[in-house]
Image: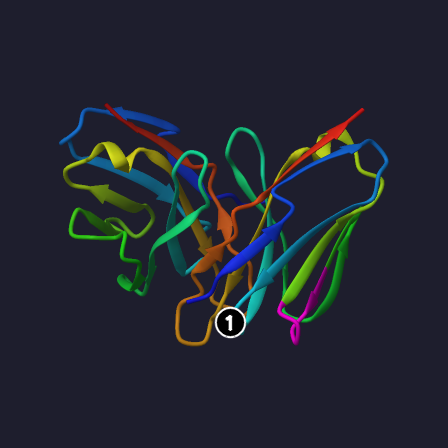
Amino acid sequence: KNEVEQSPQNLTAQEGEFITINCSYSVGISALHWLQQHPGGGIVSLFMLSSGKKKHGRLIATINIQEKHSSLHITASHPRDSAVYICAVSNYGGSQGNLIFGKGTKLSVKP
Amino acid sequence: EPEVTQTPSHQVTQMGQEVILRCVPISNHLYFYWYRQILGQKVEFLVSFYNNEISEKSEIFDDQFSVERPDGSNFTLKIRSTKLEDSAMYFCATRDSYPNQPQHFGDGTRLSIL
């Protein structure tokens, strides 16, 4: 069974700061997902990656398969980035790709 | 952009009653999932559904739970006799059949059992 650990659990930053959220998992996967959950509860998929690095706007996600580790970076953070960021992993091999979630990192960006 | 739609957004029910949570998947998606999130806890997998049958379920998904796609569009989660501990946010997610595609989540149904 895969265990997904995130750090930090809570993060407070000043507007403009560079932010890093880390995720590690215990068993090999086919894909790692970064998700964003807003205070209302809705979940949005940010990235799905199985190797290397992906970038979308101010967000960058990286993964190191050998070390079973991924990072989510936010450049030039803004108060609207305040949300819970969740790392999840999936294995499409034997299963239908159900996700195993980390506990999330609650990010608060102050103006 | 196509969305996954869940109804109702909030359901309040007496313990022991049956509830049905509904999800309208994105139209060309073939894989469907239900997840739940108890307040303050992480999101947990309940069940996956493909080709009109359950493909995988977690130990949470016991005999009180069932899923179906009654009319080819809606995807429903039924809880037969609700318990206090069923209070949670329930998320539907769907994805299409191509490999390495992300799951698209609905906004969730907040279920409160009294």
Label 1: how many Cα within 10 Å (few below 14, some 14–19, many 20+): few
Where is residue A47? Give x, y as percent.
65, 56
Q: Nearer the viewer, residue B107 or B23?
A: B107
Relative to B24, residue A53 above or below:
below
The type of residue carrying mark 1 is Val
Q: How is the image coloured?
A: rainbow
Which chain contains the residue that carries disc 1?
A
Residue B28 shows in this picture:
no
Write down the region rendered in magenta.
A62-68
Residue A37 shows in this picture:
yes
Instruction: Decide if residue A76 is on the left or right side of residue B58.
Output: right
| Magenta stretch: includes residue B11 | no
Where is residue A23? Give x, y as percent.
62, 57
| Magenta stretch: includes residue A64 | yes
Please tell me which residue is depicted at 22% across the width and 35% down the height of the picture. B19
Please tell me which residue is depicted at 51% across the width and 50% down the height of the picture. B104
Q: Nearer the viewer, residue B100 or A87?
A: A87
Please tell me which residue is depicted at 47% across the width and 37% down the height of the picture. B107
Where is the N terminus of chain B found, in terms of image quarters? Answer: top right
> In terms of secondary structure, where does tag 1 sit?
loop
Please tell me which residue is depicted at 21% across the width and 50% down the height of the picture. B66
Instruction: Decide if residue A52 is on the left or right side of residue B84.
Output: right
Where is residue A79? Give x, y as percent.
75, 29
Relative to B68, residue A27 above or below:
below
Where is the C terminus of chain B found, in terms of image quarters? Answer: top left
Q: How many marks do you count on the picture? A: 1
Instruction: Decide if residue B112 is on the left or right side of residue A1.
Output: left
Q: Which residue is mark 1?
A: A27
Where is residue B34? Give x, y as percent.
36, 50
